[in-house]
Image (spheres, rainbow, N blue to C red):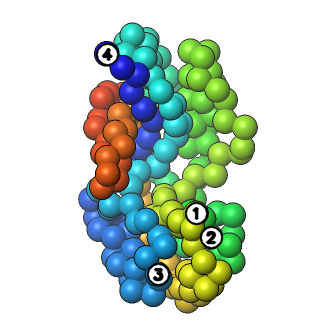
Amino acid sequence: MNAIRAFIAIDLPEDLRHKLGEIMDSLKKKTPRAVRWVPPQNIHLTLKFLGNVSPNNLNTLTQMLRQEALRHSPMQFSVGSLGAFPSKQRPRVIWVGVHAPPALMDLQRCVDQETAVLGYPVEEREYSPHLTLGRVSQNVTALELRQIADALFDTHVGDLGVVRVTEIRLYRSDLQPGGSVYTPLFTAPLKR
């Protein structure tokens, strides 16, 4: 069996995904086709992108996730505010922010460290929790970029709610012509 693309993430409640979908629908009306929008059902909070995972390593990875998850208590984070990387003036990734408590930052750091023990590289950049809504095309024109930036500055996103975290998931990511398809492979509950 071939290697699979995988990541570790936190799922979002359906009502929040619906709100994010409404925000994307509003932005789509104001932006050119130079943005590839994420289907609302695919939006999640990534803790660690693993890249290619050998099927032989899946058992070891799931055991590590089970043990690590049990070291952390359930927690909450709030969601709100619209932003972009590297900035709203030069957007490449459009996102909604996650206001992360120290417990969430600790969970991400521990997952990063434990996966490093298994040979997955530690993330060089500081963790910046966010929910990706869309990605701007590499072929965007200056006019399109300005239209996207204007739409971001004109769109106000307030507090969208709170997410209660009780588990983390390992996902498989299959790249398809119509976009990525995510399949849950393993769920690790947090400490009860």
Secondary structure beneath label 2: strand
**Which label sits on residue 35?**
none
Q: Which of the two labelled residues, at mark 1 and mark 3, occupies the earlier sequence position?
A: 3
Please give the residue where the numbered disc 4 appears in the rendered image: 1
Q: Amino acid at mark 1?
A: Gln
Q: Is residue 81 left or right of residue 88?
A: left
Q: Quadrant of residue 160?
A: bottom left
Structural distance between the alpha carbons of marks 3 and 2? 13 Å
Looking at the image, is 153 positioned above or below residue 103? below
Residue 109 appears at what percent x and percent y?
63, 34
User: Could you say which is closer to the camera, residue 171 or residue 187?
Assistant: 171
Please give the residue where the numbered disc 3 appears in the rendered image: 32
Please give the residue where the numbered disc 2 appears in the rendered image: 91
Residue 1 appears at what percent x and percent y?
31, 16
User: Badge 1: few (under 14), some or many (20 or more) residues near its Cα, within 10 Å?
Assistant: few
Please give the residue where the numbered disc 1 appears in the rendered image: 138
Which is more foreground, mark 4 or mark 2?
4
